[in-house]
Image (cartoon, rainbow, N blue to C red):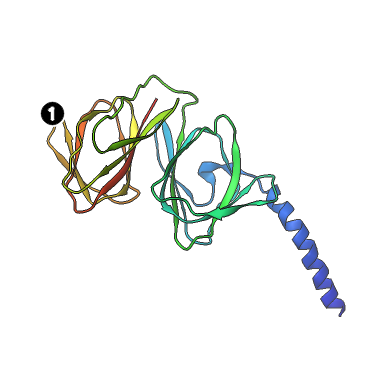
Protein backbone atom coordinates (compact mmCIF):
# COMPACT_ATOMS: atom_id res chain seq x y z
CA UNK A 1 0.00 0.00 0.00
CA UNK A 2 2.79 2.37 0.92
CA UNK A 3 4.60 1.56 -2.37
CA UNK A 4 1.43 2.20 -4.35
CA UNK A 5 0.87 5.54 -2.62
CA UNK A 6 4.48 6.51 -3.29
CA UNK A 7 4.11 5.64 -6.96
CA UNK A 8 0.96 7.75 -7.25
CA UNK A 9 2.71 10.74 -5.65
CA UNK A 10 5.66 10.42 -8.05
CA UNK A 11 3.29 10.21 -11.04
CA UNK A 12 1.45 13.36 -9.94
CA UNK A 13 4.70 15.25 -9.45
CA UNK A 14 5.92 14.24 -12.91
CA UNK A 15 2.66 15.41 -14.45
CA UNK A 16 3.25 18.83 -12.90
CA UNK A 17 6.95 19.06 -13.65
CA UNK A 18 7.16 17.75 -17.23
CA UNK A 19 5.26 20.68 -18.87
CA UNK A 20 7.59 23.10 -17.07
CA UNK A 21 10.62 21.13 -18.22
CA UNK A 22 9.33 21.30 -21.80
CA UNK A 23 9.21 25.09 -21.63
CA UNK A 24 12.68 25.15 -20.10
CA UNK A 25 14.02 23.44 -23.23
CA UNK A 26 16.43 25.83 -24.88
CA UNK A 27 15.27 26.79 -28.40
CA UNK A 28 17.74 26.23 -31.24
CA UNK A 29 18.14 28.03 -34.58
CA UNK A 30 15.75 26.68 -37.20
CA UNK A 31 18.58 25.02 -39.16
CA UNK A 32 19.56 23.05 -36.02
CA UNK A 33 16.07 21.76 -35.23
CA UNK A 34 15.18 18.08 -35.27
CA UNK A 35 14.10 16.84 -38.71
CA UNK A 36 15.10 20.17 -40.30
CA UNK A 37 17.74 19.27 -42.88
CA UNK A 38 19.77 22.04 -44.62
CA UNK A 39 19.95 21.10 -48.30
CA UNK A 40 21.09 24.28 -50.08
CA UNK A 41 22.47 27.73 -49.33
CA UNK A 42 24.09 30.67 -51.09
CA UNK A 43 24.40 34.42 -50.49
CA UNK A 44 20.62 34.89 -50.73
CA UNK A 45 18.85 31.91 -49.18
CA UNK A 46 19.18 28.97 -46.81
CA UNK A 47 16.92 26.09 -47.77
CA UNK A 48 15.77 23.37 -45.37
CA UNK A 49 13.79 20.20 -45.97
CA UNK A 50 11.52 19.63 -42.99
CA UNK A 51 10.62 15.94 -43.23
CA UNK A 52 8.72 14.30 -40.38
CA UNK A 53 7.17 10.85 -40.60
CA UNK A 54 3.94 10.22 -38.65
CA UNK A 55 4.55 10.59 -34.92
CA UNK A 56 7.83 12.46 -35.35
CA UNK A 57 8.36 16.06 -34.32
CA UNK A 58 10.80 18.91 -33.85
CA UNK A 59 12.19 20.50 -30.72
CA UNK A 60 11.67 24.20 -30.00
CA UNK A 61 13.34 26.31 -32.69
CA UNK A 62 13.56 29.96 -33.74
CA UNK A 63 12.33 31.57 -36.97
CA UNK A 64 13.84 35.06 -37.27
CA UNK A 65 14.29 35.75 -41.00
CA UNK A 66 11.69 36.27 -43.72
CA UNK A 67 10.64 32.87 -45.00
CA UNK A 68 8.98 31.12 -47.93
CA UNK A 69 7.46 27.68 -47.37
CA UNK A 70 6.37 25.13 -49.99
CA UNK A 71 4.40 22.11 -48.79
CA UNK A 72 5.38 19.03 -50.80
CA UNK A 73 3.56 16.49 -48.57
CA UNK A 74 0.90 17.71 -46.16
CA UNK A 75 0.92 15.57 -42.99
CA UNK A 76 -1.01 17.11 -40.06
CA UNK A 77 1.03 19.05 -37.53
CA UNK A 78 0.15 19.72 -33.91
CA UNK A 79 2.02 22.78 -32.68
CA UNK A 80 3.24 24.32 -29.47
CA UNK A 81 4.32 27.94 -29.09
CA UNK A 82 7.23 28.53 -26.75
CA UNK A 83 6.09 29.91 -23.41
CA UNK A 84 2.44 28.88 -23.83
CA UNK A 85 0.86 25.84 -22.22
CA UNK A 86 -1.93 25.22 -24.73
CA UNK A 87 -1.16 23.40 -27.96
CA UNK A 88 -2.17 24.40 -31.47
CA UNK A 89 -4.53 21.66 -32.72
CA UNK A 90 -3.36 19.46 -35.55
CA UNK A 91 -4.43 20.62 -38.99
CA UNK A 92 -3.61 19.08 -42.34
CA UNK A 93 -2.10 21.50 -44.83
CA UNK A 94 -2.76 21.61 -48.56
CA UNK A 95 -0.19 19.82 -50.68
CA UNK A 96 1.52 22.27 -53.02
CA UNK A 97 0.58 25.34 -51.02
CA UNK A 98 3.05 28.24 -50.85
CA UNK A 99 3.37 30.78 -48.07
CA UNK A 100 5.43 33.80 -47.07
CA UNK A 101 5.97 34.91 -43.47
CA UNK A 102 7.93 38.07 -42.47
CA UNK A 103 9.58 36.57 -39.38
CA UNK A 104 12.17 39.39 -39.46
CA UNK A 105 9.39 41.65 -38.11
CA UNK A 106 8.42 39.28 -35.31
CA UNK A 107 10.50 36.28 -34.24
CA UNK A 108 8.55 33.05 -33.77
CA UNK A 109 9.56 30.11 -31.54
CA UNK A 110 7.65 26.83 -31.69
CA UNK A 111 7.80 23.09 -32.13
CA UNK A 112 5.50 20.70 -33.97
CA UNK A 113 4.66 17.02 -34.28
CA UNK A 114 3.20 15.27 -37.31
CA UNK A 115 0.02 13.58 -36.11
CA UNK A 116 -1.13 12.64 -39.63
CA UNK A 117 -1.04 9.25 -41.32
CA UNK A 118 1.42 10.39 -43.99
CA UNK A 119 4.73 12.30 -44.06
CA UNK A 120 5.06 16.04 -43.53
CA UNK A 121 7.50 17.34 -46.15
CA UNK A 122 7.94 21.11 -46.19
CA UNK A 123 10.62 23.12 -47.98
CA UNK A 124 11.56 26.13 -45.84
CA UNK A 125 13.46 28.91 -47.64
CA UNK A 126 14.93 31.51 -45.29
CA UNK A 127 15.88 34.83 -46.93
CA UNK A 128 19.34 35.72 -45.63
CA UNK A 129 19.45 39.38 -46.63
CA UNK A 130 17.87 41.63 -43.98
CA UNK A 131 16.19 43.79 -46.65
CA UNK A 132 15.39 43.75 -50.37
CA UNK A 133 18.32 44.09 -52.74
CA UNK A 134 18.34 45.75 -56.14
CA UNK A 135 16.33 43.21 -58.15
CA UNK A 136 13.02 43.85 -59.93
CA UNK A 137 11.19 40.70 -61.09
CA UNK A 138 9.07 41.19 -64.20
CA UNK A 139 5.46 40.07 -64.54
CA UNK A 140 4.78 36.76 -66.31
CA UNK A 141 1.70 37.52 -68.38
CA UNK A 142 1.78 34.32 -70.42
CA UNK A 143 -0.51 31.25 -70.36
CA UNK A 144 0.39 28.68 -67.70
CA UNK A 145 1.79 31.02 -65.02
CA UNK A 146 -0.33 32.31 -62.14
CA UNK A 147 1.10 34.83 -59.70
CA UNK A 148 0.78 33.69 -56.07
CA UNK A 149 2.09 36.79 -54.32
CA UNK A 150 4.19 39.88 -54.85
CA UNK A 151 5.54 41.62 -51.76
CA UNK A 152 8.56 43.67 -50.67
CA UNK A 153 10.86 40.64 -50.64
CA UNK A 154 9.80 38.20 -53.35
CA UNK A 155 7.49 37.51 -56.27
CA UNK A 156 6.13 33.97 -56.72
CA UNK A 157 4.24 32.06 -59.42
CA UNK A 158 2.69 28.65 -59.94
CA UNK A 159 3.13 27.00 -63.34
CA UNK A 160 0.56 24.38 -64.29
CA UNK A 161 0.96 22.84 -67.71
CA UNK A 162 -0.84 19.83 -69.30
CA UNK A 163 1.15 17.28 -71.35
CA UNK A 164 2.18 18.63 -74.75
CA UNK A 165 1.55 22.28 -73.87
CA UNK A 166 4.18 25.05 -74.04
CA UNK A 167 4.31 28.36 -72.18
CA UNK A 168 5.07 31.65 -73.82
CA UNK A 169 8.58 33.04 -73.19
CA UNK A 170 9.38 34.89 -69.96
CA UNK A 171 12.56 36.72 -68.99
CA UNK A 172 13.97 36.15 -65.52
CA UNK A 173 15.38 39.40 -64.16
CA UNK A 174 16.21 38.36 -60.58
CA UNK A 175 17.76 35.31 -58.89
CA UNK A 176 15.30 32.70 -57.70
CA UNK A 177 14.25 29.11 -57.31
CA UNK A 178 12.12 26.48 -59.03
CA UNK A 179 10.47 23.76 -56.91
CA UNK A 180 8.70 20.73 -58.40
CA UNK A 181 5.36 19.61 -56.96
CA UNK A 182 4.23 17.26 -59.76
CA UNK A 183 5.36 16.34 -63.24
CA UNK A 184 7.21 13.80 -65.35
CA UNK A 185 9.46 15.68 -67.77
CA UNK A 186 9.85 19.10 -69.34
CA UNK A 187 11.92 20.72 -72.05
CA UNK A 188 13.46 24.09 -71.23
CA UNK A 189 13.66 26.33 -74.30
CA UNK A 190 16.21 29.11 -73.78
CA UNK A 191 16.92 31.68 -76.44
CA UNK A 192 20.33 31.07 -78.02
CA UNK A 193 20.78 27.60 -76.47
CA UNK A 194 19.97 24.01 -77.43
CA UNK A 195 16.66 22.82 -75.97
CA UNK A 196 17.26 20.89 -72.74
CA UNK A 197 15.00 18.09 -71.42
CA UNK A 198 14.78 17.68 -67.63
CA UNK A 199 13.31 14.81 -65.61
CA UNK A 200 11.14 15.91 -62.68
CA UNK A 201 10.62 14.52 -59.17
CA UNK A 202 8.36 15.87 -56.48
CA UNK A 203 10.38 18.02 -54.06
CA UNK A 204 13.29 18.63 -56.46
CA UNK A 205 14.54 22.21 -56.78
CA UNK A 206 16.73 24.27 -59.11
CA UNK A 207 18.46 27.57 -58.38
CA UNK A 208 18.08 29.99 -61.30
CA UNK A 209 20.26 33.00 -62.01
CA UNK A 210 18.79 36.04 -63.80
CA UNK A 211 19.27 36.81 -67.47
CA UNK A 212 17.60 33.92 -69.30
CA UNK A 213 14.62 34.25 -71.61
CA UNK A 214 12.91 30.88 -71.63
CA UNK A 215 9.80 28.89 -72.40
CA UNK A 216 8.82 25.50 -70.98
CA UNK A 217 7.21 22.57 -72.80
CA UNK A 218 5.60 19.69 -70.92
CA UNK A 219 7.16 16.75 -72.75
CA UNK A 220 5.94 14.18 -70.21
CA UNK A 221 2.76 12.19 -69.72
CA UNK A 222 1.38 13.95 -66.62
CA UNK A 223 0.52 17.54 -65.77
CA UNK A 224 3.30 19.79 -64.47
CA UNK A 225 2.78 21.71 -61.25
CA UNK A 226 5.79 23.75 -60.13
CA UNK A 227 6.59 26.87 -58.16
CA UNK A 228 9.03 29.59 -59.20
CA UNK A 229 10.00 32.71 -57.33
CA UNK A 230 12.35 35.63 -57.88
CA UNK A 231 13.93 37.71 -55.14
CA UNK A 232 13.84 41.48 -54.79
Q: Residue at x 70, y 48 (%)?
A: 24
Q: Residue at x 20, y 37 (%)?
A: 167
Quadrant location of the N terminus? bottom right
Q: Is residue 92 left or right of residue 169?
A: right
Where is residue 177, by image quadrant? top left
Extreme-bottom residue of the structure: 1
Q: Is residue 104 left or right of residue 164?
A: right
Extreme-right residue of the structure: 2
Number of callouts in the render?
1
145, 34: nearer the viewer? 145
Q: Residue at x 53, y 42 (%)?
A: 30
Residue 163's x, y, as percent? Answer: 19, 49
Residue 218's x, y, as percent? Answer: 19, 45
Q: Is residue 43 left or right of residue 139?
A: right
Where is residue 109, by image quadrant? top right
Task: Identify the secondary structure beneath mark 1.
Answer: loop
Residue 95's x, y, as percent? Answer: 40, 51
Residue 47's x, y, as percent? Answer: 42, 40
Residue hosting label 1: 192
Quadrant location of the C terminus? top left
Instruction: Classify 10 Å Cα crowding around label 1: few (below 14), some (14-19), many (20 and above).
Output: few
Q: Residue at x 29, y 24 (%)?
A: 173
83, 148: nearer the viewer? 148
Amino acid sequence: MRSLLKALVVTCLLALVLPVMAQDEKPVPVEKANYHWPIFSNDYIMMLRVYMRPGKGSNFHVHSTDQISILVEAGANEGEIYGKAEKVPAKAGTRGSVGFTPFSKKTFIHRSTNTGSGPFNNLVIALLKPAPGSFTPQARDVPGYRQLFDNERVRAWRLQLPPGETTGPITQTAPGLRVIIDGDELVEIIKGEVDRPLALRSGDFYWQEPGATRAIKNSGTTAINLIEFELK
